[in-house]
Amino acid sequence: MPKPDRTRAGGNGGRLPEADQEAFYRISLQGRLGPEWADWFDGLSISADEGTMTVLSGRVEDQAALYGHLKRARDAGLTLLSVTRIDPKRDREEI
């Protein structure tokens, strides 16, 4: 089976779409974290519902930083529920 031709992917000269660019994310986790964990998650906003769900949200520098946040969540014993990229111009209330 031939490998995909990444030079034509998305017509962007072979670059992956915005992989190394800053973006805003909403990360939903099963488990609870308090606001005192914000430094460990590089200043992401932390909110918890009245149940057992925590949401991390905010600006993430690049994909490597995103994976770092996901690793920290795993290391804290939290289960990943979802990761959503947010358009800050359109979804301002979610950040």
Image (cartoon, grey):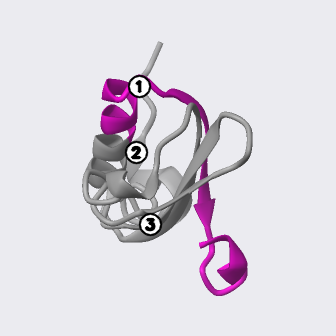
Point 43% across, 58% down: residue: 35
| 19 sits to left or right of 83 | left
Point 33% across, 42% down: residue: 67
| 13 sits to left or right of 33 | left
Point 49% across, 51% down: residue: 9
Instruction: Decide which of 54, 94 is in the foreground and name it.
Output: 54
Instruction: Decide which of 7, 42 is in the foreground and name it.
Output: 42
- Residue at mark 3 to residue at mark 1: CA–CA distance: 18 Å
Question: Which one is earlier in the sequence, the residue at label 2 or at label 3?
Answer: 2
Number of residues whose C-alpha sits closer than 10 Å to that of mark 2, classed few (under 14), some (14–19) or many (20 or more): few
Which amino acid type is marked by label 3?
A: Asn
Question: Which one is earlier in the sequence, the residue at label 3 or at label 1?
Answer: 1
Number of residues whose C-alpha sits closer than 10 Å to that of mark 1, classed few (under 14), some (14–19) or many (20 or more): few
Which amino acid type is marked by label 2?
A: Arg
* Residue 43 % position (x, y): 33, 66
| 16 sits to left or right of 25 | left
* Residue 25 % position (x, y): 53, 60
Instruction: Name the residue tied to disc 3.
Output: 12
Instruction: Decide which of 92, 54 is in the foreground and name it.
Output: 54
Number of residues whose C-alpha sits closer than 10 Å to that of mark 3, classed few (under 14), some (14–19) or many (20 or more): few
Q: Secondary structure at mark 3?
A: loop
Instruction: Name the residue tied to disc 2.
Output: 6
Instruction: Name the residue tied to disc 1.
Output: 3
Which amino acid type is marked by label 1?
A: Lys
The answer to if 84 sits in the magenta stretch is yes
* Residue 1 % position (x, y): 47, 12
Cβ–Cβ below 8 Å for labels 3 and 1?
Answer: no
Q: Secondary structure at mark 1?
A: loop
Point 38% across, 52% down: residue: 7
Task: Check the image and name the residue furthest to the top.
Answer: 1
Q: Which residues are magenta?
A: 70-95
- Residue at mark 1 to residue at mark 2: CA–CA distance: 9 Å
